[in-house]
Image (cartoon, rainbow, N blue to C red):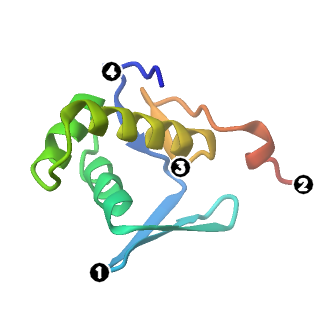
Amino acid sequence: MNVDKDAMWSISPDVRATYSEDGAVLLDIRKELCYSLNPVAARVWSTVETSPSGVDLRGLVDVMETHYRISHEQLERDIAEYLSKLEQIGLVQRNGLFHGSKAAGARG
């Protein structure tokens, strides 16, 4: 997975989150879709959410390294893949730009 390590990631403005000990539930209010996150994914989400000006991959990996015992390289790969998936469905933005799939966001 080749993700720009200097890109700044932020939450899409149409997404709301609710947290529990089981993870989180995301609501895309524009598409009227819900998504559930496991506790690890919820921690990544919360780190992006609490960074209003955005957070880069390096910052996310640094935060996650304090919570999980996994190699830096593996964390970087896993988080980059996760961010890419979130971007494809329109839940996060890279550098303040919406890159989500047009089909996923189409409404009649």
Give the labeled residue for mark 1: 21
Q: How many marks?
A: 4
| Numbered circle sitting on residue 108 | 2
Give the number of the disc on residue 5. Answer: 4
Q: Secondary structure at mark 1?
A: loop
Neighbours of disc 2 within 10 Å: few (<14), some (14-19), many (20+) = few
Q: Residue 42: image x %, image y %?
A: 35, 62
Q: Residue at x 17, y 54 (%)?
A: 68
> The disc labelled 3 sits on which kind of residue?
Leu
Q: Alpha carbon of mark 1 to alpha carbon of mark 4: how far?
A: 30 Å
Q: Which mark is residue 11?
A: none
Label 4 is placed on what type of residue?
Lys
User: Which mark is nearer the camera, 4 or 3?
Assistant: 4
Residue, disc 3? 91
Q: Quadrant of the C terminus?
A: bottom right
Q: Position of residue 61 (x, y in %)?
A: 22, 38
Q: Considering the numbered disc 3 on the image, is that residue within a helix, a strand or a loop? A: loop
Q: Is residue 7 left or right of residue 106?
A: left
Tag in front: 3 or 1: 1
Disc 1 + disc 4, Cβ < 8 Å: no
Q: Closer to the N terminus: mark 4 or mark 3?
A: 4
Q: Residue at x 29, y 31 (%)?
A: 57
Left or right: where 81 falls relative to 47: right
Seen from this angle, which residue lies furthest bottom?
Answer: 21
Can residue 52 be seen at all in this image of the molecule?
yes
Question: Taking 28 as reference, is 95 left or right?
Answer: left
Separation of residues labelled 2 and 4 (CA atoms): 36 Å
Confirm or deny contact between disc 2 and disc 1 (CB under 8 A).
no
Q: Residue at x 35, y 55 (%)?
A: 45
